[in-house]
Amino acid sequence: MMRFLVFLLILYAIFHVAVLFKIAFSVLFLAALVVGFWVLWRLKWVILGIFGLEELFGDR
């Protein structure tokens, strides 16, 4: 019985660490995504100018 409880405790610890890493990676991914979209938003007129589409969206 004691071995089974230790086995369950080890499984729980592994699962708990995996969930924490998954949360940490998702938060980091979300932060990188937000920074990326912010940079794209700041450079939107440059990007539109490269493609020659700034006339379609009017003045700043």
Image (cartoon, grey):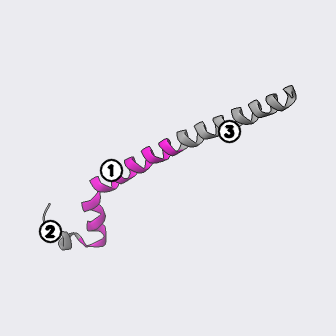
Which corner quadrant holds the N terminus? top right
Q: Of the residues shown, which amino acid type is indicated by label 2? A: Gly
Q: Which residue is labeled 1 in the image?
A: 38
What residue did someone put label 2 on?
A: 58
- The residue indicated by pointer 3 is 15
Task: Tell me where residue 9 appears, x and y as whole percent.
Answer: 75, 30
Q: Is residue 31 above or below residue 50?
A: above
Specify the quadrant of the image occupied by residue 54.
Answer: bottom left
Circle 1 residues within 10 Å: few <14, some 14–19, many ≥20: few
**Residue furthest toward the front?**
1
CA–CA distance in space, label 1 to label 3: 34 Å
Q: Image height check: is 10 above or below 48? A: above
The residue depicted at 19 percent of the width and 69 percent of the height is 57
**Was residue 10 drawn as part of the magenta stretch in this picture?**
no
Say whether disc 1 or disc 3 marks the residue closer to the N-terminus: 3
Badge 2 vs badge 1, beta-carbon distance below 8 Å:
no
Residue drawn at x 30%, y 68% as measured from the top left: 50
Badge 2 or badge 3: first in the primary sequence: 3
Question: Amino acid type of disc 1?
Answer: Trp
Residue 48 in the image: above or below residue 3: below
Secondary element type, mark 2: loop
Q: Which residues are magenta?
A: 26-53
Q: Earlier in the sequence, mark 2 or mark 1?
A: 1
Q: CA distance from mark 2 to mark 1?
A: 21 Å
Residue at screen point 51% across, 45% down: 26
Residue 17: image location, x then y, percent? 65, 35
